[in-house]
Amino acid sequence: TPHPTNYPTKIPTKHPSRYLSHHPTQSPKSQNGEIDTNNICDKTFCDHLSGSGITFDIITKNHGIVITAIELSLETTARNLQVELWTRTGSYSDSPDSLDGWQWQNDGQPYVIPQPYGRSKLSPIPKDDFKSITVPAQTTLGVYLALRSVSGLVLGISTLDDKAQDDHVQLVYGVAKPYRFIHASTQTVI
């Protein structure tokens, strides 16, 4: 934020800024070689749209990272929400219209979020179920997150440019994609 109104807090305020910044006021902390990218992810998107899937890239710089958790902004509060996580070496844009070259994480099974919170707060994939993903240094990892429902994943709009970064990692915003990239009359495509 060019002109912060206060010092950063660990707990979100009830009155966040209307506009986003790609320059966090604090750097992510490293613990045991793991990088906390919450400062990047939480300040990256506006919640204007929803859909069934989203693609984006994670680009590591001089150090690898370990993704140990994923939290989603969801419209839905439907119980036992199934979420598929797909990754690929290289950019999501290398395979824009099919799942060729993508690997379905979690041994080819969806993760289940027992009780999503809706827009009130981020809904985590249960940590006991999540299988960490290692991204080596100087690597691009394409990511595709998809709900098995028609929509409900809150998608974002970048207000400044198409990426967020710190000293360790860069996130490159992708595009909304229908479930498994299939265009069907029951899908809402944004």
Image: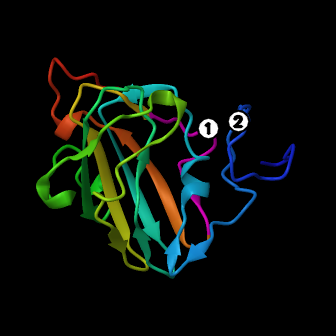
Residue for point 50% across, 81% down:
33
Residue for point 53% across, 48% down:
162
Q: In which quarter of the image is residue 88?
A: bottom left
Q: Does the magenta stretch include residue 58?
A: no
Q: Which segment did they paint magenta?
A: 155-166
The reply to whether discs 1 and 2 touch (Cβ–Cβ < 8 Å) is yes
Residue for point 49% across, 57% down:
171
The amino acid marked with disc number 1 is: Thr
The C terminus lies in which quarter of the figure? top left
The amino acid marked with disc number 2 is: Tyr
Residue for point 35% across, 34% down:
115
Dominant secondary-structure state across the stretch colored magenta: loop
Query: Alpha-carbon distance for marks 1 and 2?
Result: 8 Å
Q: Residue 19 carries which label?
A: 2
Compared across the picture, whether 188 is left or right of 139 comes to left
Q: Residue 159 carries which label?
A: 1
Q: Using the image, determine if residue 164 lies above or below residue 29.
A: above
Q: Which of marks 1 and 2 is nearer the N terminus?
A: 2
Viewer can see residue 104:
no
Q: Using the image, determine if residue 167 lies above or below residue 41.
A: below
Whole-percent x, y for residue 105 in the image? 21, 59
Viewer can see residue 21:
yes
Q: Quadrant of residue 28?
A: bottom right
